[in-house]
Image (cartoon, rainbow, N blue to C red):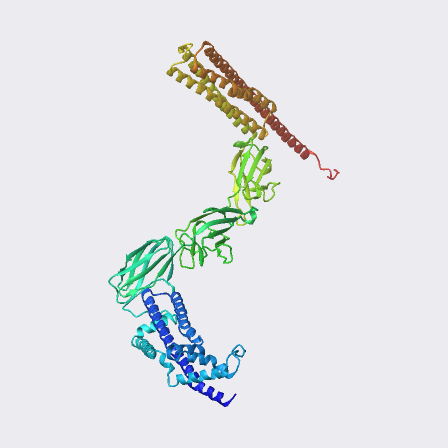
Amino acid sequence: MSSSAEQLDARLERELLAPLRMLRRRIRLYMLLDGLLWFATAVVLAALAQMALDWNFRFSVGQRGVISGLVVLYWLWAGYRRLYEPLARPLPEDLLAGIADRAHPDLCGRISAAVELRAVARGAPDSAGHLPVGASPDLARLVLAEACQSVRGRRLQGMLNHRRALLHAVELVLLVLLAGLACAAAPWLAGPWLERNWLLRDVRWPQRTYILPEGFDADGRRRMARGDPAEITAAVAGLVPDNAVVTWWTPSGRQGREPMSVVGDTRLAAGLGQLSEEIHFRISGGDEHTRDYLVEAVDRPRVVHTLARITPPEYTRLADVVVEQQTVLEVLRGATLTIEARLNKPIRRARFVADDGTDVQAKIDWPEDAAEPVVRVRWSAPDSGVFRFDLLDADGLTNRDPVPYRIRVVPDRPPNVEMELVGAGELTTPQAELPVQLQCEDAYGLGAARLMVQTGSQPERAFPLPGLTPGDRRFSANFALLVAASGAIAGDELRVWGEAEDLDPRGPNVGATPVATLRVVSPDDFLIELARRELTLRQEFERLVSAQRQIKEGLEQTSGLLADGAPPDAGLAQRLAALARRQAAHGSQCLGIARGFEQILRETETARVDRPADAARIAQRVVAPLEELARAAIPAAADAIDELRAKVSPAGRALAADHQADLLRHMEALLAEMVEWEGYREAVSLLEAVIAAQTALRADTLAALGEQLESILELERLLEPEDDAAPAP
């Protein structure tokens, strides 16, 4: 490159390019001032808005954190748009040259032309690496020289608005100073704003009145039981306001304002009605405007379903009993009771308490890993009483009006024992064989069964009954008790009863039958007693025969007053009905007399004093006719009388009269048989007495003869000489 070209480049650098670079720096400085002013204004306005919002609404920590995040995002956006983006925009020399040409129209675009022809004048390639084509370097140098000559003495920065830039600088300084002075002059505002919104501390704004709702957490939330009265109480610090109001609203759209009353000079209270859904509210009073608070409606813990398992004692060998949704439980003593209660929500504590509030001695747990909230109570020795669940959840809420569980512990009852002495009355004989029927039953199993016998004042004796397997629910035994084996003789009193015991390890429980007391008498005394009873039965039958004659006579009298072909009038019908009832009652009386004779036969057989011929005669000629009268003849006679109430006819009256005649004839014949039998029995008894007396006389005679013979023999022995006496000399 020639020296003239170098001189031109130095002149171009000094007179044109250097002023353009100075213009670039000045433009960037003014853009920085403008961006800083705008950014500072955004910072101050956002801070003031944040302070105003927090002052009026008293945001929670979380809400303040969100607003601070939004403010930071706004500041970043303002810095990017007003600082980074303008300053990062490139300002090439050709752009600056164009700006300078527009600011100096008299230069006719020489600055832009000089910037473009600078490379041509040097003969250097352009930015794309190509040499300019068709451009003369000499002409380019000439244009450059004219451009340098034209801008000599001109200030390119003069086209900028220096006054506006200075004003922005002053405004920026004043804004910063005012912000600093405001923070210094009102630290009671700046400090809480900084701590609340940027350090996220829960400090209060400076004011004369501070109202703090009670029972709410740091986020302004409180959980209360659904259905309870929503009572809002707040503590007041500082000046107590004359008027305070709760403004509330719900998600369902309900809203309202409730005045708060002063309680104890330092507290405020207001009721929002019954809590059915969550309630948002804020309190205004004096210079206090609290933030929004939330009352959440939660359910109290409660039992929604129960499953009770009763495990009987091992000795019962019974399966577990499982019942659902049952609050009245009957538990066998010694059983284990397990109650599983499903809840509506998780809990923190559970108790199973008695009606007086004392805890039961049971194992209670509420597993946290369960699929649903449950409480399990395992009580190995439950007591009778009324019990309930006492639940406490994580919110400190308890269950209200818990369902009472009535538990009744029943003891294992003694076995049920029944005994029957078949064919035995109050008397028996020493040679008697008493047929005993014993029935034992226990709900949970028998352990042993025995027959107890006591004679007079002697110790009682136990006779175990074979065939019983421990654990059997029922057991029956039939056997004969020999009176002689018990050691009883005539004149003794024999007591017999049955006993059975169960398998209860606490006992065992013993069940017993009533004591059957029998008087042991001689066979003669026994027969005398039976004869007396037979006489009583015969006398009862005699009265029955007499009553039957009265019925027959009454029917004859009434029949004479009846008119054929028409029903009797009310009076006669009533008399017929009375006769029919009396006639029917004779049937049960006949049957009772027959049963009395049968009992006598059974007792004679049991006492071993029976005579087969006598027993057959009584059964065939007394008992059988009595039963025939009770089951056929007497009911037929009663029906015939009753038919006359519906319609009177000669045939009906004749039939009723025939039944009465036949019935009375059979009864009189049976009575004669009874009298004849008594005479026969008396004759037999007399004969037996004669035979017994003759036997006793013979025995006495033989005894007397024996005594006389012994005395004679004793006399002869005294008169005879001794065999070993010495012979006479």
Q: Where is residue 630 in the image (x, y as percent from the top left)?
A: 51, 21
* Residue 296 visible, this angle: yes
* Residue 91 visible, this angle: no
The number of callouts visible is 0
Q: Position of residue 49 (x, y in %)?
A: 34, 68
Tell me where residue 157 sits by quadrant. bottom left
Q: Is residue 482 above or below residue 299?
A: above
The C terminus: image quadrant:
top right
In this rendered view, identify the residue nearer to me: 393 or 473.
393
In this rendered view, identify the residue nearer to me: 66 or 310.
66
Tell me where residue 146 sits by quadrant. bottom left
Q: Is residue 62 above or below residue 724?
A: below
Q: Left of 83 or right of it: where is 662?
A: right
Q: Which residue is at 39% across, 15% downward? A: 572
Q: Position of residue 84 (x, y in %)?
A: 43, 74
In this rendered view, identify the residue nearer to me: 723 or 368.
368
Q: Is residue 365 above or below residue 520?
A: below
Q: Left of 142 or right of it: where is 695?
A: right
Q: Where is residue 60 in the image (x, y as percent from the top left)?
A: 37, 65
In this rendered view, identify the residue nearer to me: 537 or 55.
55
Residue that sits furthest to the bottom in the current view: 3
